[in-house]
Amino acid sequence: MRQVAPSTVRRLSLYLHFLETNSGEGEVTVSSGALGVAGGATSAQVRKDLSFFGSFGRRGVGYAVRDLAEHLRDILGLGRTFRVVLVGAGRLGAALAHSDRERGFAIVGVYDTDAARIGAELDGLAVRDAARLEADLAASPADIGVVGVPAAEAQGVADRLVRSGVRGLLNFAPLLLAVPPDVAVRNVNLTLELDGLAFALRGRSH
Amino acid sequence: MRQVAPSTVRRLSLYLHFLETNSGEGEVTVSSGALGVAGGATSAQVRKDLSFFGSFGRRGVGYAVRDLAEHLRDILGLGRTFRVVLVGAGRLGAALAHSDRERGFAIVGVYDTDAARIGAELDGLAVRDAARLEADLAASPADIGVVGVPAAEAQGVADRLVRSGVRGLLNFAPLLLAVPPDVAVRNVNLTLELDGLAFALRGRSH
């Protein structure tokens, strides 16, 4: 498959979530204009994004909501279950465990280094000692690892996950992880986004 | 002040968190190379980023950790307290309320539309009925609003926050919010980042 820019993937994902949010309202077709609003793109960009992967819409009619949602799930690779391990059983991890268990991302293990957390339950899974990570992943591999530990421990945890065969990392720590080129990393960072808002609001005050 | 690219702001924030993570280890100076690793940039880029805001480092010596951290907090506008209201008392909101109360982001109100949540406590604050949002913000304005409601309600909540004078939004919903040009938006989205990993891992399987 040709290379697809991360910004395109993000728009496809926004189109999909727009369709999923609105499909309950009985809409049968959707215009490229409405998809564009959802994805922050022009109608022309929407048509270009979608035509890259095949021909879905009909001129003057738009896109069939259900069909397009299914195609987008296929394109994004969401037609399967991803095995996810979570290292760092904090609140962000809990939010993840709770929100995404029905979307094809199955949390199969939760780990922590903090003795106070080990043995506790997080959404139905017992929190395990992070020392067991390598042995558990050797016996039962995972696709995605969530790095939910403090910044000082994050690179070490990422290294251990990668050595154990994990090829996708979701990083919650405010640093850039160094990984081999065949490992994908996405960052979710409340701290950095709040800093960005602080910068945007500097000089203003109530 | 001249226009600063969002990517620059992000790097400044990464430099700051690197300094904060490592300052406890007794390091007095830090090289542009080490900052570059933290921020995903070359040494030359680090020097350029920092020289844009003044002259901080000394050739051959590097940057003084404490001084540079303080300068970065100033540059980013983190020298004050931001009043934050959280709409949608879900788990991501709880993660935020817990993690950032010591960093100058003070959660001053938590709201929800779900009667089952109203009156409950979230990190020391009682969850209020979202119907009170306008009246409360008129009496006691806020700088930042966190949009933590489901996607179908997110734009409506954003509109209400903006009409009530909020000029920075942190959005947890998988859609792009439409806001006036003087309102800053940052997105934190577990769902979109997981979709991005799914796409990166498509065709691979254990």
Image (cartoon, coloured by chain):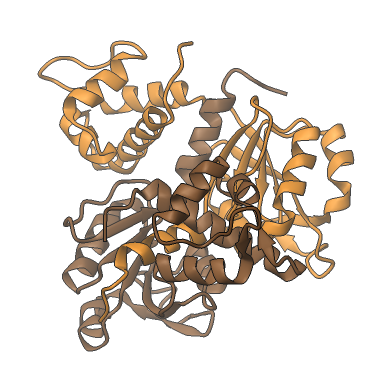
Chain colours: A orange, B brown
* Residue under the image location 52 percent in, 42 percent down: B44
Q: Can residue A69 be seen in this snapshot?
A: yes
Image height of B78 relative to B61, above or below: below
* Residue under the image location 67 percent in, 35 percent down: A179
- Position in image of residue A144 (x %, y %): 66, 37
Left or right of residue B126, residue B20 in this image: right
* Residue under the image location 23 percent in, 17 percent down: A57
Q: Can residue B189 be seen in this snapshot?
A: no
Q: Quadrant of the C terminus of chain B?
A: top right
Left or right of residue A27, residue A120 in this image: right
Hey, which quadrant is residue A23 in on the image? top left
Hey, which quadrant is residue A163 in on the image? top right
- Position in image of residue A103 (x %, y %): 52, 39
Q: Residue furthest front?
A: B59
Image height of B8 relative to A66, above or below: below
Seen from the viewer's position, the closer of residues A129 and A80 is: A129
Image height of A91 relative to B173, above or below: below
Hey, which quadrant is residue A173 in on the image? bottom right
Q: Residue furthest left?
A: A60
Q: How many marks?
A: 0
* Residue under the image location 22 percent in, 60 percent down: B156
Q: Quadrant of the N terminus of chain B?
A: bottom left
- Position in image of residue B127 (x %, y %): 42, 79
